Image: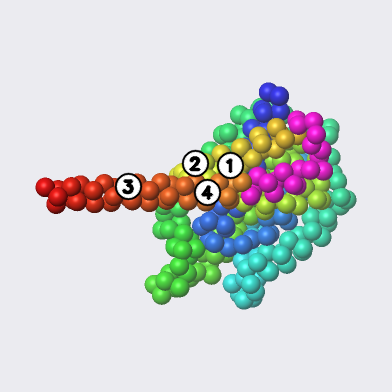
């Protein structure tokens, strides 16, 4: 069980970069980007093929980062310049990346066995913690800069930002590119961790990313950027731990994992609403009691 939990934490940290990427589009830009399912595999494919070709693993991961950014730029251009609906832009790019990823890999599955991987000299959990929290701190600093604030403002109210003369098309493209770059980087790390890249490994990543963000916000909250990014990381870790524990349950099979994912997301969405409703009812009850107490006191005082 402890081994399963450790593996869940390790995978959670590796998927945390993907959760941070989804957070940028989902929360910051308010953009429904489905490119994630394709760019995750793109990062894994680039890192795997380059590593097999003799490129140092760390450089292969950096190249995967830029490959994901390129995919995000294409999605952003389809939306901003092509005037295509945001959801449809992501779907189009996701479909295109399916063929592109297959071209990169050359076949549906490519193994890293027998080649140097990123975690050969440094333990997974150590490197993942350093990398994830370094990215988190850099994102926190970025979102406090003028460009970062423009990006946040674009998601909040793009019309207002445009009225001040800012180019919302540029900030939207930048945000989507940064998001998919982090997603691709996560895909590259996961490929090195599991020792192979697969054409279908990115399927459902947007759902996992959204689940991570929602779970983190439900448990930790998102009072500001620092806590929001931290919540996304914690949400990814918690999701993978729940996933690992579910795999240990005897009456559950691997084929049930998608159902478990759906249940986790439903719980993450419903629990905050239920909690908010209960708090509101408690506040309303307290106010009613205070009003009744005041009325009784006023009546008794009037009686005297």
Q: CA distance from mark 3 to mark 1?
A: 38 Å
Mark 2 neighbour class, 10 Å CA radius: few under 14, some 14 to 19, many 20 or more: some
Provide the secondary structure element on which disc 1 rests. Answer: helix
Q: CA distance from mark 1 to mark 2?
A: 9 Å
Q: Which numbered mark, 2 or 4, is in the foreground of this view?
A: 4
Residue 64 placed where, x, y %? 69, 49
Q: Secondary structure at mark 3?
A: helix
Q: Is residue 296 left or right of residue 197?
A: left
Write down the region rendered in magenta. Answer: 248-266
Q: In the image, what residue occupies the spot 45% across and 53% down?
A: 143
Residue 161 in the image: x percent, y percent? 43, 69
Give the mark nearer the N terminus: 3 vs 1. Answer: 1
For marks 1 and 2 on the same chain, the one whose residue lies earlier in the sequence: 2
Question: Predominant secondary structure in magenta?
Answer: helix
> Foreground residue, 92 or 27?
27
Q: Which residue is mark 4?
A: 274
The answer to whether residue 235 is left or right of residue 117 is left
The reply to whether the C-beta atoms of the residues labelled 4 and 1 are less than 8 Å apart is no
Q: Earlier in the sequence, mark 4 or mark 3?
A: 4
Q: Position of residue 228 (x, y in %)?
A: 49, 47
Regarding residue 234, the answer to whether it shows in the image is yes
Kindly identify the residue that appears in the image at 69 percent across and 49 percent down: 262
Q: Earlier in the sequence, mark 2 or mark 4?
A: 2
């Amino acid at each position: 069980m402890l081994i399963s939990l450790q593996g869940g934490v390790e995978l959670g940290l590796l998927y945390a970069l993907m959760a941070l990427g989804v957070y940028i589009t989902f929360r910051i830009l308010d953009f429904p980007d489905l490119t994630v399912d394709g760019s995750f595999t793109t990062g894994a494919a680039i890192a795997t093929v380059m590593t097999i070709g003799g490129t140092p693993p760390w450089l292969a991961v950096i190249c995967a980062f830029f490959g994901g950014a390129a995919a995000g730029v294409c999605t952003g251009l389809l939306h901003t310049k092509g005037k295509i609906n945001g959801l449809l832009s992501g779907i189009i790019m996701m479909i295109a990346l399916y063929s592109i990823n297959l071209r990169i890999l050359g076949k549906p599955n490519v193994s890293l066995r027998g080649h140097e991987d990123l975690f050969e000299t440094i333990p997974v959990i150590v490197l993942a913690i350093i990398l994830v929290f370094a990215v988190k701190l850099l994102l926190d600093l970025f979102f406090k800069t003028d460009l970062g604030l423009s990006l946040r403002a674009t998601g909040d109210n793009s019309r207002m930002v445009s009225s001040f003369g800012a180019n919302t098309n540029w900030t939207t493209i930048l945000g989507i590119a940064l998001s998919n770059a982090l997603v691709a980087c996560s895909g590259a790390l996961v490929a090195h961790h599991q020792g192979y890249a697969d054409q279908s490994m990115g399927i459902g990543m947007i759902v996992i990313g959204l689940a991570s963000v929602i779970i983190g916000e439900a448990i930790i909250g998102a009072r500001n950027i620092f806590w929001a990014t931290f919540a996304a990381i914690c949400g990814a870790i918690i999701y993978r731990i729940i996933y690992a524990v579910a795999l240990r349950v005897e009456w559950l099979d691997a084929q049930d994992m998608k159902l478990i994912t759906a249940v986790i997301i439903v719980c993450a969405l419903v629990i905050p609403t239920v909690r908010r409703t209960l708090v509101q009812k408690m506040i309303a009850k307290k106010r009613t009691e205070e009003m009744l107490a005041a009325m009784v006191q006023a009546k008794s005082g009037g009686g005297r």
